[in-house]
Amino acid sequence: QVQLVESGGGLVQAGGSLRLSCAASGRTFRSYVMGWFRQAPGKEREFVAAIYWSGGSTNYADSVKGRFFMSRDNAKNTVYLQMNSLKPEDTAVYYCNARPLLGTGDYWGQGTQVTVSS
């Protein structure tokens, strides 16, 4: 059974940092793209960042470029989202996603709340 378990959310002041973790289990993710998405109250879920498990190349939404950094630990089957210079508009529930490079059928974590106070 595939599981994506997020952790690391919390309350932080504007300008602060948080690191989110997503522990993946239940299958091999070498042919997957791992992503972070977020959803603020009353808004659509939006893309934040992604990393190709094989190779490690990354992509970021314009709104977080230069502030957020995604990485992976192959040995721990875990991806991370380092979030720096946080802004109140970064407040949202952050979700981990695993999407296959070929085919369909992606997986989602349960989400972790990030709240940035001004």
Image: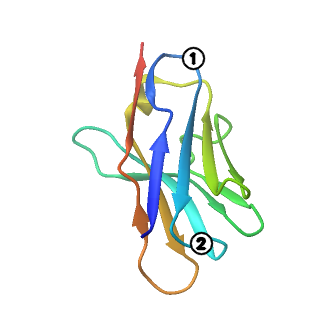
In the image, residue 33 sits, relative to residue 47, either above or below, namely: below
Q: Residues within 10 Å of mark 2 (few under 14, many from 20)?
A: some
Query: Which residue is painted at 49% across and 24% down in the image?
Result: 87
Q: Which mark is residue 15?
A: 1
The residue lying furthest to the bottom in this view is 103
Q: Could you tell me which quadrant the N terminus lies in?
A: bottom left
Q: In the picture provided, is 1 more to the left or to the right than 31? A: left
Q: Residues within 10 Å of mark 1 (few under 14, many from 20)?
A: some
The residue lying furthest to the right in this view is 55
Q: CA distance from mark 2 to mark 1?
A: 32 Å
Q: Image quarter for residue 2?
A: bottom left
Who is closer to the viewer here, 93 or 22?
A: 22
Query: Residue tagged by mark 2?
Result: 32
Which residue type carries mark 1?
Answer: Gly
In the image, residue 107 sits, relative to residue 89, either above or below, namely: below
Q: In the picture provided, is 47 more to the left or to the right than 58? A: left
Query: Which residue is painted at 53% across and 62% down in the image?
Result: 25
Question: Residue 64: image x %, image y %?
Answer: 57, 40
Q: In the picture provided, is 41 more to the left or to the right than 89? A: left
Question: Residue 12: image x %, image y %?
Answer: 48, 18
